[in-house]
Image: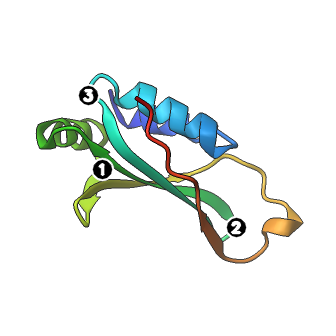
Amino acid sequence: MTTTALASLRRHSDVSSLKSSLHQLCSEFGRITRLDILTAMHEGTKQAICFLRMEKPEQEQQLMKALGVGRFGGEVVFVLNLDIPVTADDDGPSSRWADSEIYE
C-alpha cells in the first residue's frame, strides 16, 4: 500500500462511501475501532479530515508507515483533498462532523 491508495480515496463525493473505502483499505492491517470524518472547505477545496483508531497500536504503526500519515491526539490523522467540484453554496470556509459509525 502506498500514498497512491490515499489518492484513490479522493474520488469519493460522500462520507459513507469514503468510510466504506477506508475500512476496506485499512483491513489488511486490522479492524478500525473508531472512525470520525470532519468535512471542510479550505481555499476552495473540499476536504475530508479523517481520524481513526485501530484495535492495536502495532496496527496503527503499520498503517501510518504504509500511508505516510501521522498521529494527533492519540489518533491516526490525515487530510484528503477531495476531487469534488465546488459549488456557489460551498463558498467560504466551513466544516462539519460526519456521523461516526463503527462497522463490525
Q: Estimate how packed mark 3 is, as few (under 14), some (14 to 19) or many (20 or more) residues with alpha carbons within 10 Å.
A: some
Counting from the top left corner in percent of width and height, residue 51 is at 39, 54
Residue labelled with disc 2: 44
Q: Secondary structure at mark 1?
A: loop
Earlier residue among tags 3 and 2: 3
Q: CA distance from mark 3 to mark 2?
A: 35 Å
Counting from the top left corner in percent of width and height, residue 35 is at 42, 47
Residue labelled with disc 3: 30
Looking at the image, the residue that sits furthest to the right is 88
Looking at the image, the residue that sits furthest to the top is 28
In the picture, residue 89 is in which quadrant? bottom right
In the picture, residue 47 is in which quadrant? bottom right
20 on left or right of 15: left
Counting from the top left corner in percent of width and height, residue 69 is at 30, 50
The residue mark sitting in front, 3 or 2, is 3
Residue labelled with disc 1: 69
Residue 42 in view here: no
Q: Which quadrant would the C terminus be assigned to in this image?
A: top left
Q: The disc labelled 3 sits on which kind of residue?
A: Gly
Q: Residue at x 84, y 60 (%)?
A: 87
Q: The disc labelled 2 sits on which kind of residue?
A: Gly
24 on left or right of 76: right
Q: Estimate how packed mark 1 is, as few (under 14), some (14 to 19) or many (20 or more) residues with alpha carbons within 10 Å.
A: some
Query: Closer to the camera, 66 or 49?
Result: 49
Earlier residue among tags 1 and 3: 3
Q: Secondary structure at mark 3?
A: loop
Q: The disc labelled 1 sits on which kind of residue?
A: Val
Q: Residue at x 73, y 77 (%)?
A: 92
Query: Closer to the camera, 22 or 91?
Result: 22
Q: CA distance from mark 1 to mark 2?
A: 23 Å
Residue 26 in view here: yes
Looking at the image, the residue that sits furthest to the left is 58
